[in-house]
Image (spheres, rainbow, N blue to C red):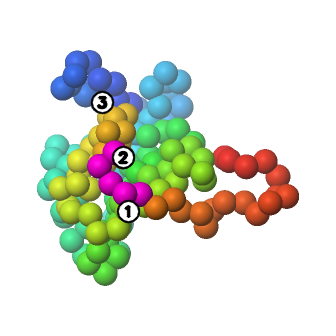
Amino acid sequence: MVNFRCVRSAPSDLLCQEGPRGHDVDMPPLSIETLNGRVGLPESWLLFVARELREPDGFVVVNDGQRNSYAQAFNDEGTLLLEYRDRSPERHFQVRGVGIGEVAEALSQWSEGDRSFVHGHQWERLTEWDRPAGDGPRGD
């Protein structure tokens, strides 16, 4: 299993190092998964995402190492879906019909801890993971 810990050393520099999960509490491990399994940090997000999402059912998940915190994209029969979950079912959103460049930029930003891409879309909150009333405390 390949995990990465990333920190920004300057506004345009992201330093990532490979390491075992749970080794450094201050820098949670970043993981990237595709239909073919776990992969390393891509050199070009645009080329990587275009390759992984070119066929229906292709997907990319970028997990930032925090519990229930990820961004992902999925090719739904030619329509690209972009989704993010920010540590809670109440913070789980999706947008449909985004372009490949927007997906690449969003996943790249998520991998760097940047959430600027959120402001560029009309998001729909996903509610299918919400717990029914009376089913214990809400949120994960």
Residue 16 shows which numbered tag? 3
Amino acid marked by disc 1: Val
Q: Residue 73, position in %: x, y?
A: 35, 61
The answer, for residue 37, to whether it is visible in the render is no
Give the mark, 2 or 3, whose residue is nearer the N terminus: 3
Answer with left or right where residue 114 lies relative to residue 28: left
What's the distance in space between the residues labelled 2 and 3, CA to CA?
Answer: 23 Å
Q: Which residue is mark 1?
A: 95
Q: Nearer the viewer, mark 1 or mark 3?
A: 1
Q: Which residue is mark 2?
A: 118
Q: Residue 42, position in %: x, y?
A: 22, 46
Residue at image point 85% right, 58% down: 134
Q: Is residue 116 above or below residue 33?
A: above
Q: Residues within 10 Å of mark 1 (few under 14, many from 20)?
A: some
Give the mark, 2 or 1, whose residue is nearer the N terminus: 1
Residue at image point 34% right, 45% down: 119
Amino acid marked by disc 3: Cys
Q: Is residue 52 above or below residue 44?
A: below
Amino acid marked by disc 2: Val
Q: Which residues are magenta?
A: 119-123
Q: Nearer the viewer, mark 2 or mark 3?
A: 2
Q: Secondary structure at mark 2?
A: helix
